[in-house]
Image (cartoon, coloured by chain):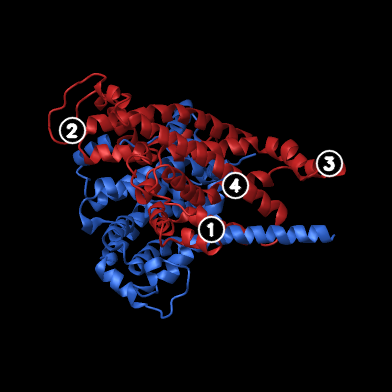
């Protein structure tokens, strides 16, 4: 007897998930594109079509939106690099260096990942306090007082401080994925390399990195998706300040929301939506490849 | 031999350093939550001279943490059940019946992992559905947010549940609901727990959704309360630390209880083959 798919795998099983997804994700995103071309605001019930006006504002040199986009990209690119490099170093340390206790170390290094970002941001606000914070007092205590900074209030440093805190929080996640990638490399490659007398760096460059490329691609994509949408940690640490030095796309979107400039805000959100849909297409192809190989 | 030995010691020292850096903020929160106001003023790493357990009592009454804690628990639990169940049902049918249409639906849904939220038009949806500023609204929003990743995670796992079981069950006269709940769900338990734990942690830590869609403090979860508390009492590092500790403690407990599931979920999908 052949199992009849339609009867036993009914489409209505998909409905709850699909309806939730359509109503709370797809419909807002698509209708957002429509509202991007209007003067929608929270002060008036009238919504008029204004053409490209909102996009002109976003891309105008006299506004700050280009700066917010630039900050978002700086944040995203540096966190991608920092989390991948540090994550890989930690992953190698735990798989090659410390076989015993590696599980225990991994467990502790992962803890920041699970903490609510808003809580992490507020804790680091105290750690980075220029006069009483743990970072500056520790630097002074070990005689490195010259390195002490106004981490979150100096406009030249603040964005990098936010990046540093975010890397601290997120690196454990990347490390865990990279460890899984490292463990899937066949040991034989390293055994052959050992016979040939290859050292640590030679093995890293000629075996580990090439074999890790698929995993590194995936962590890059994950970091990219996260970085473009970052909000909590910035909001908690600096709320975009000092001035606009750490404002990113989503903090600007929240500002537009609070100030009632909904047409402008939705235009800004829609730009991100279109960009990330394209990105999402490649992510899906990547994930699909993963499953086929499995 | 000696070189190898010292390299090993060095590796362990580095790993211990990394662990310390990872948990220092947590340590700071624990110690400062037990200090007096003046002792905690610099948020130093020193241990408290006297343990002020009453900080927790104060913070619970001053920050109205009881209701917020229950709100968070309610949001995280209810949305996790709804989100995990609907994702599992969808993933089951999408994975078992791979018609062209279902393949498309699968990719369409997991595209949601990448998509950003439009908070403006979502406000309109929340107003039209009368869910704005309500607890139900929060739960549904959080459940909806979990769907794409949940479907992706569970769909991947279902490949390991043999289809022959379905056939045997169907021949025995099981309908779709019996087949799903009596046969498939028990076999999917590991991935369902993983998805549920990740969803729970995600909702517990979520700040942005209630920030946009809850203006009534009575409905606030812990994340919003802790932020508000910080703005009101940011000089009182001891009380603030106690508040943060109560926000992160459930997360830490769930983590230690279910870390096996968390780590497997985090790597599933990311690394295959």
**Residue A66: x and y, percent?**
36, 29
Q: Are marks 1 and 2 in contact (CB under 8 Å)?
A: no
The mark total stands at 4
The disc, 2 or 3, on the residue closer to the chain's N-terminal end is: 2
Whether marks 2 and 3 lie on the same chain = yes
Using residue A141 as the reference point, say whether residue B83 is left or right of it: left
Q: Are marks 2 and 4 in contact (CB under 8 Å)?
A: no
**Observer-nearest residue: A23 or A114?**
A114
Tell me the element at label 4. Answer: helix
Chain under callout 4: A
Residue B105, quarter of the rendered image? top left
Density class for disc 3 (Cα within 10 Å; few <14, some 14-19, many ≥20) is few
Quadrant housing the N terminus of chain A: top right
Q: CA distance from mark 1 to mark 2?
A: 44 Å
The residue that mark 1 highlights is: B22
Who's red, chain-wise? A
Tell me the element at label 2. Answer: loop
Tell me the element at label 1. Answer: helix
Chain under callout 2: A
Density class for disc 1 (Cα within 10 Å; few <14, some 14-19, many ≥20) is many
**Observer-nearest residue: A54 or A287?**
A54
Residue A158, quarter of the rendered image? top left
Using residue A197 as the reference point, say whether residue B120 is left or right of it: left
The residue that mark 3 highlights is: A192
Q: Residue at x 27, y 28 (%)?
A: A31
Chain under callout 3: A
The residue that mark 2 highlights is: A41
The residue that mark 4 highlights is: A86
Q: CA distance from mark 3 to mark 1?
A: 36 Å
């Amino acid at each position: 007897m052949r199992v009849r798919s339609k009867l036993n795998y009914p489409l209505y099983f998909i409905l709850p998930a699909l309806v939730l997804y359509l109503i709370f994700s797809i419909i807002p995103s698509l209708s957002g594109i429509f509202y991007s071309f209007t003067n929608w605001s929270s002060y008036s019930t009238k919504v008029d079509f204004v053409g490209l006006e909102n996009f002109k504002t976003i891309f105008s040199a006299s506004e700050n939106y280009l700066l917010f986009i630039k900050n978002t990209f700086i944040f995203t690119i540096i966190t991608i690099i920092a989390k991948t490099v540090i994550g890989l170093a930690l992953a190698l340390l735990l798989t090659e260096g410390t076989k015993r206790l590696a599980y225990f170390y991994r467990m502790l290094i992962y803890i920041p990942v699970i903490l609510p970002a808003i809580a992490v941001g507020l804790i680091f606000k105290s750690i980075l306090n220029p006069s009483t914070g743990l970072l500056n007092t520790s630097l002074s205590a070990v005689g490195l007082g010259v390195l002490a900074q106004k981490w979150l209030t100096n406009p030249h440093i603040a964005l990098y401080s936010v990046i540093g805190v975010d890397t601290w929080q997120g690196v454990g996640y990347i490390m865990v994925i990279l460890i899984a990638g490292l463990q899937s490399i066949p040991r034989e490659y390293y055994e052959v390399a050992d016979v040939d007398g290859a050292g640590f760096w030679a093995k890293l460059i000629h075996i580990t990195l090439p074999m890790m490329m698929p995993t590194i691609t995936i962590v890059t994509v994950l970091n990219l998706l996260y970085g473009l949408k970052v909000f909590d940690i910035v909001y908690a640490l600096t709320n975009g300040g000092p001035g606009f030095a750490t404002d990113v796309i989503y903090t600007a979107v929240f500002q537009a929301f609070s100030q009632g400039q909904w047409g402008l805000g939705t235009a800004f959100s829609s730009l991100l939506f279109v960009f990330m849909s394209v990105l999402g297409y490649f992510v899906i192809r990547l994930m699909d490849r993963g499953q086929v190989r499995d | 031999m000696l070189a190898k030995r010292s390299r090993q010691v060095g590796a362990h020292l580095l790993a211990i350093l990394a662990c310390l850096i990872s948990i220092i903020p947590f340590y700071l929160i624990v110690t400062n939550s037990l200090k007096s106001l003046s002792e905690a003023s610099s948020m130093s790493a020193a241990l408290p001279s006297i343990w002020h357990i009453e900080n927790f009592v104060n913070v619970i009454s001053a920050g109205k943490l009881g209701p917020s804690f229950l709100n968070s628990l309610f949001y995280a639990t209810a949305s996790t059940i709804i989100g995990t169940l609907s994702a599992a049902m969808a993933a089951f049918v999408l994975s078992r019946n791979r018609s062209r249409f279902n393949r498309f639906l699968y990719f369409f849904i997991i595209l949601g992992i990448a998509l950003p939220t439009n908070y403006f038009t979502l406000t309109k949806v929340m107003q039209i559905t009368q869910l704005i500023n309500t607890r139900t609204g929060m739960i549904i929003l959080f459940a909806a947010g979990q769907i794409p990743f949940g479907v992706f995670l569970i769909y991947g796992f279902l490949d390991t549940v043999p289809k022959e079981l379905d056939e045997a069950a169907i021949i025995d006269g099981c309908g779709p609901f019996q087949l799903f709940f009596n046969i498939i769900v028990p076999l999917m338990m590991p991935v369902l727990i993983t998805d549920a734990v990740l969803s729970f942690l995600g909702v517990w830590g979520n700040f942005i959704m209630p920030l946009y869609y809850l203006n009534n403090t009575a409905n606030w979860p812990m994340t919003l309360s802790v932020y508000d508390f910080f703005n009101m009492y940011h000089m009182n590092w001891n009380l603030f630390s106690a508040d943060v500790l109560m926000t992160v403690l459930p997360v830490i407990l769930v983590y230690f209880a279910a870390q096996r599931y968390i780590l497997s979920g985090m790597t599933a999908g990311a690394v295959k083959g």
